[in-house]
Amino acid sequence: MNQTQNDTGAQIDASTNDTGAQAITALLTKHFAPIHIALENQSHLHAGHNEEAKQHNNTHYKLVIVSAQFAELSRVARQRAIFNALGDLFDTTPLHALSISALTPDQAKQQNII
C-alpha cells in the first residue's frame, strides 16, 4: 500500500493503481476532511464466493477513516454517513462490500492509528 498526502494534509494509504480506491478516497476526503484514511483492497480474499470478485479486483475493501466530523455521531450514524457520501458507487462500480472503522482523532490516538 502506498502512503500519500492529499490537499487537506490527510494521510492516505491506498494503491495508486486502484481506481476503486481512488474514487472512494476522493469522495470521503471531499465529505469528511479526514486526517487519516487507510483503504485496503481485500478483493482477493473473496474471489471464491463472489462472481464479480472473480472478474474484477475492486470489489471488497477495508476502510479506516479518522475525522473530527464523527465526534457527535454513533457508530451506525458514521457508517450511514459514509455510505451516503459514496453515493451510487455500489451500483455503478464493481464495489460489493466495505468494512468500515470510522473514528474520531481521539479514538484513533487511543488505538495508535495516528
Image (spheres, rainbow, N blue to C red):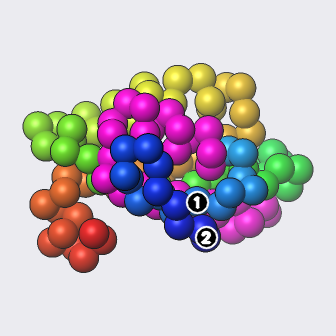
Q: Quadrant of residue 95?
A: top right
Residue 35 falls within the magenta-colored stretch: yes
State yes or no: discs 2 and 1 in contact (Cβ < 8 Å): yes
Residue at (37%, 52%) from the top-left corner?
Answer: 9
What amino acid type is highlighted by mark number 2?
Answer: Met
Q: Position of residue 91 (x, y in %)?
A: 67, 26
Q: Which residues are magenta?
A: 21-49
Give the number of the disc on residue 1.
2
Q: Residues within 10 Å of mark 2 (few under 14, many from 20)?
A: few
What residue is at 68 percent from the left and 57 percent from the top? 16
Q: Mark 1: which secondary structure?
A: loop
Residue 5 at x, y percent in the picture: 46, 56
Q: Position of residue 49 (x, y in %)?
A: 75, 57
The percent position of residue 110, horizontal first and vertical second, equals 15, 72
Q: Is residue 53 visible?
A: yes
The residue that mark 1 highlights is: 14
Q: Is residue 90 magenta?
A: no
Is residue 79 among the parts visible in the rendering? no
Residue 58 vertical placement versus 95 (above, below) = below
Mark drawn on residue 113:
none
N-terminal of the pair, mark 2 or mark 1, is: 2
Name the side, left or right, on which 2 lies relative to 48. left
